[in-house]
Amino acid sequence: MIGSISTQDPQFQFFTFFHKIPHHHIMRLLLTKPATVSFARVRFRSMSTLFPQPTEARAHELVENYNKILAKVHALNPKTRLVAVSKFKPSSDIMALYSIGVRHFGENYVQELVAKSEELPKDICWHFIGGLQSGKCKDLSNRVTNLWAVETVDTLKKCRQLNNARERKEGEIINVYLQVNTSGEEQKSGFLEMGDLEETIKYIQSDECKKLNLIGLMTIGSIAESKSDHEENNDFKKLVEWKKILDKKYQLDLELSMGMSNDFEQAIRQGSSCVRVGSSIFGARPPRLEK
């Protein structure tokens, strides 16, 4: 897991310097007398010319916000993964957190994810967490080479489309979470019936599916449950129950992706392996402009 690191920390300076400078430049530096090398100048030139950078004030704000959330996550379970949801935010914001070692970022829209993945470092672990349309599966699978996970797979058809596109591209295996509609709300996507979910699991486990790895289950709890004063969130409770059934039947150990800015702490208390936090780190988002 990633610890709290300040932009002023020497570890931050060391990481950003050596991670981005080409090998032949490093060799030149090693053969140069220390007195003649300006560390800060070389580091700044190397970073700024490769990727968009935030202002110092913005970087400080983002690092502080991230570390606050990370501290809360670690206080409850240091093994829980924190995904920084960067939708509608500029690439420079992502680089502020990337520079302190953050690698897991989440995006909601395929077009935005594709653009950012092409512009930013290739060791970022991208999570697609938005509603997945069948027509976008090919673009998502083909154009995001460092796609770490798709967390919103809600039909067998979309599983097949993701796998087939990735196989034709000869890309790396994609982790998938199967989304469950635990609240039963009509406006939400996700499996409603255990039988449909099991059919999809059987496909992923078959020899036919070579490019998908089933990593877990995902849900988006209802607003009512996230604001309730119940001891347990019933939407999260249902996902935990489904996990137990599936783990036993299919010899799995499924992760649980549940919890966002308003309810991630409760989600962790109920066993979440992965939380998706956006506005508490990056601030309020502007409304999406319809094209």
Image: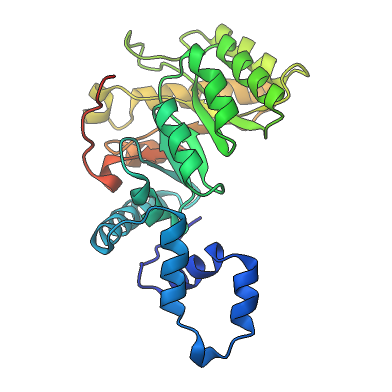
**Residue 206 lies in what quarter of the image?**
top right
**Residue 260 lies in what quarter of the image?**
top left
Q: Position of residue 211 (x, y in %)?
A: 69, 26
For this orientation, the residue located farthest to the right is: 207
Residue 219 visible in the picture = yes
Q: Position of residue 176 (x, y in %)?
A: 57, 27
Q: Position of residue 272 (x, y in %)?
A: 45, 37
Would you place residue 45 above or below residue 287 in this image? below
**For this rendering, which residue is in front, 175 or 197?**
175
In the image: residue 244, left or right of residue 97: right
Q: Position of residue 282 (x, y in %)?
A: 28, 46
Would you place residue 137 above or below residue 269 in this image? above
What is the tally of numbered marks visible in this picture? Answer: 0
Residue drawn 23% across and 44% down? 283
In the image: residue 183, left or right of residue 285: right
**For this rendering, which residue is in front, 120 or 279?**
120
Residue drawn 28% across and 54% down? 65
Q: Name the image quarter holding the C terminus.
A: top left
